Amino acid sequence: MLEVGTKAPDFKLLDQDGKEHSLTDYRGKKVILYFYPKDNTAGCSKQACGFSELYPQFVEKDTVVLGVSKDSVASHKRFQEKFNLGFTLLSDTELEVIKAYDVWHEKKMCGKVYMGVVRTTYLIDEQGMIVKAFDKVKAADNPAQMLGEI
């Protein structure tokens, strides 16, 4: 996980509609950048639906929510449509941003060891600095937690 007080790495990723986004596009706004393991899984769906439900309150606080996983643009589009998500999902199939934000780690499940995304959320200020960082977050609680942080 990256340290609070450091500059957030810039990136260029495609969203669920194939539009390119970079962190610098959001200078002057707070950004919640959250990394999640996989579209359409129970925890990731709860987290995404929570952010979508609270999204109008984030907008009121001049804050953008960006979700990032290694899923494809097409997968993100299906995920967004299935749950009617009101915020941007970014596709990092090459793991460049996932690794730059230090969220690609060894994980264990059912005795199996594998590499994967550790659910992590960063709050980035208007100048692109990391002001809060949370790893191993509880998916269902994370959206309300982040609303409280801003």
Image: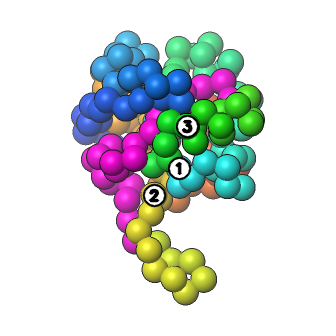
The disc, 1 or 3, on the residue closer to the chain's N-terminal end is 1
- Where residue 116 appears, x then y in whole percent? 44, 63
- Where residue 21 appears, x then y in whole percent? 39, 23
> Are there few (<14), some (14-19), or many (20+) residues within 10 Å of tag 3?
some
Where is the C terminus found, in terms of image quarters? top right
Task: State yes or no: discs 1 and 3 in contact (Cβ < 8 Å).
Answer: no
**Circle 3: residue type:** Ala
The residue positioned 61% from the left and 48% from the top of the image is 39
Hey, which residue is sitting farthest bottom in the picture?
Answer: 111
**Circle 2: residue type:** Val
Q: In which quarter of the image is residue 8?
A: top left
**Above or below: residue 139 compared with residue 145:** below
- Where residue 52 appears, x then y in whole percent? 69, 30
The residue positioned 34% from the left and 50% from the top of the image is 95
Q: What element carries label 1?
A: loop
**Above or below: residue 61 compared with residue 44:** above
Question: In this picture, which residue range is highlighted in magenta?
Answer: 85-106
| Viewer-closest of 120 and 96 | 96
- Where residue 32 appears, x then y in whole percent? 49, 32
Where is the N terminus found, in terms of image quarters? bottom left
**Above or below: residue 98 compared with residue 17:** below
Residue annotated with mark 2: 117
Hey, which residue is sitting farthest front in the picture?
Answer: 74
Q: Which dot marks residue 12? A: none
